[in-house]
Amino acid sequence: MRHLRPAILFLAALLASATLLLAAAAYTIFLKDGSSLVARQRYTVQNGRAIIILLNGTETFVALDKIDVPRTDAANKGGYGTGVVIPGSPQDVGAVPAQIPRDQTLGDLINKKGAGPREVPGTKRDKDQAAAGRLMRTKAGYNDFSALARRPYPHADLTAALQQFFRGQGLDDIEIFEGTAGDHPLIEISANSEGSVFKALNSAAAGLLQIRDSFPGRVAAFDVLLTTQSRERAGQFVLTPEMAAELAAKKVEVAAFFVKNVQF
């Protein structure tokens, strides 16, 4: 077993304490590609698609044949929620395997993937140089976004466009500040569940791509800080256009993206 850095263990504990996955109230759906979704209840089936209600209330769907039905049913045995399969579905549940791994949380993914400090991309200045003496470091050596002085982002037109975009995404608890560089706005988002963390990352990726199209050459990356309602850190990211395009195109599953790119 890999030895995890203390910061990794800290995040796993934080995510657990922030109710990122409540086993008694959640239904985990395992896909055949090894990824998983956490829903409020069992999915319903319509026209060969599994209709899923995520923990944050968002409705989504996946092709039914992509779901690992035996593993999903076994993992949620005794806790199906209130969902039902609509009669007439061409699929039925399969046999339960002899041994099924327990539900995976972000802490499990961090453990499995061995997430750790990575080189911060995108900045041209010396990474050890403080911006006007206000940059502090995390335990893993990254710029600590939670310690940045909260100064309004100086470009009002960009701020207004970003606020409008994120409101359209259903993210109201969001603030925009001056980040670690002039072309790095700091996007601070409150995320109190695993579903809201993933929604925030997807929305930030889409927002970065849109703002770069609307205001060419003015934004190089987003500094993204996720916090709980009590203002504790739930992860931070330097979101580059390349990373955003990869996530927006669904070339990487959002949980794997979190583990790969989160900074501690």
Image: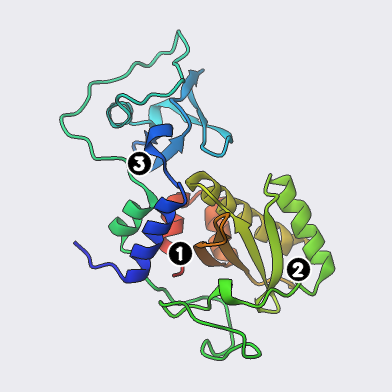
Q: CA distance from mark 2 to mark 1?
A: 25 Å
Q: Secondary structure at mark 3?
A: loop
Mark 1 belongs to which amino acid? Asn
What label sits on residue 33 in the rendered view?
3
Q: CA distance from mark 1 to mark 3?
A: 20 Å
N-terminal label among 2 and 1 = 2
Q: In this orientation, which residue lies closer to the viewer: 254 or 138?
A: 138
Q: Which residue occupies 43% across, 13% down?
A: 89
Which residue is under mark 2? Answer: 216
Q: Taking 183 as reference, is 29 above or below it?
A: above
Q: In this orientation, which residue lies closer to the viewer: 231 or 158?
A: 231
Q: Secondary structure at mark 1?
A: helix
Look at the image and name its color scheme: rainbow
What label sits on residue 67 in the rendered view?
none
N-terminal label among 3 and 2 = 3
Image quarter of residue 38: top left
For label 3, the crowd category at 10 Å Cα-Cα, with few meaning under 14, some 14 to 19 and many 20 or more, is: few
- Image coords of residue 148 (percent x, y): 62, 77
| Residue 48 visible at all | no
- Image coords of residue 139 (percent x, y): 41, 77
Mark 2 belongs to which amino acid? Pro
Which residue is under mark 1? Answer: 261
For label 1, the crowd category at 10 Å Cα-Cα, with few meaning under 14, some 14 to 19 and many 20 or more, is: many
